[in-house]
Image (cartoon, helix red, strand yellow):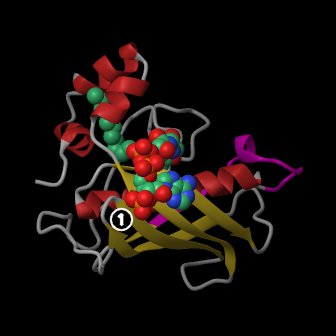
Amino acid sequence: MKPVRHPDAPAPGQLLGAHYGECFGCGGLQPHGLHLQARAGEGVSITAEFTVQPAHQGAPGLAHGGVLATALDETLGSLNWLLRTIAVTGRLETDFVRPVPVGTTLHLEAEVTAVAGRKIYSRATGRVGGPDGPVAVRAEALFIEVKVDHFVQHGREEEIQAAMNDPDQVRRARAFEVNP
Ligand SMILES: CCCCCCCC/C=C\CCCCCCCC(=O)SCCNC(=O)CCNC(=O)[C@H](O)C(C)(C)COP(=O)(O)OP(=O)(O)OC[C@H]1O[C@@H](n2cnc3c(N)ncnc32)[C@H](O)[C@@H]1OP(=O)(O)O
């Protein structure tokens, strides 16, 4: 089925902000995290930016592939906020097309291509040298819708409590609001 943008999804151009301060992908409290900034696009699409830091190296001077996969994963995960669905990555297939040096800003875009029951299909690209630059990474993903119970059951008690007590209303909403 074609994905449906939730009526309360943030307007195109709006920054999403972090869904969790300690998130390695987008949180502000992780010194070596990606600090990825995602913005709502048209339909069920997202754009995001991430600048490769020295802490993200694999080979000397180059981004680690796993870090680039994290950037794709985080961008793709942000799409779920436009659907107002809580979902986790079930499958993430990544193509590494060209190396990404430290200091480079990766310009990411992602869209949901289809939804089938709990399965959310999506794809993303990351470009260098600007939003219209050459493609450096590409991914296709399958996210699976879960209930908040997924995190309560599997997460560590102290972090779950902290997330529940988060004074930031938007982050709390992103953590707890399911498709109404
Ligand atoms: C109180 C505090 C609350 C806090 C709340 C915070 C919310 C914040 C908001 C957002 C959070 C996201 C944060 C973003 C971070 C970026 C995203 C990540 O990195 S997420 C982490 C990595 N991913 C995992 O850890 C998943 C681990 N895997 C699992 O838990 C399970 O395997 C799960 C839930 C994915 C599926 O398990 P099943 O038992 O629920 O469902 P089954 O029946 O196995 O699958 C359902 C359908 O999906 C297919 N499926 C499942 N996995 C598949 C796969 N790997 N490949 C292909 N198909 C797959 C199955 O074949 C099935 O399809 P058919 O309905 O039969 O057609």
The answer to whether 19 appears left or right of 83 in the picture is: right
Q: Is residue 109 above or below residue 170?
A: below
The answer to whether 60 appears left or right of 56 in the picture is: right
Q: Nearer the viewer, residue 148 or 60?
A: 148
The percent position of residue 107, horizontal first and vertical second, equals 55, 70
Q: Amino acid at mark 1?
A: Arg
Whether residue 115 is visible, yes or no, is yes
What quarter of the picture does the C terminus occupy? bottom left
Whether residue 77 is visible, yes or no, is no
Q: Nearer the viewer, residue 143 or 100?
A: 143
**Among the 4 quarters of the image, the one containing residue 39:** bottom left
Residue that appears at 57% across and 85% down: 132
**Among the 4 quarters of the image, the one containing residue 179:** bottom left
Residue that appears at 46% across and 31% down: 29
Q: Is residue 98 above or below residue 62?
A: below
Residue labelled with disc 1: 39
Residue that appears at 49% across and 62% down: 142
The percent position of residue 104, horizontal first and vertical second, equals 68, 63
Q: Is residue 122 above or below residue 142?
A: below
Label 1 element class: strand
The percent position of residue 59, horizontal first and vertical second, equals 88, 51
- Magenta stretch in the rendered image: 48-62
The answer to whether 80 appears left or right of 134 in the picture is: left
Judged from this view, the residue extending furthest toward the top is: 158
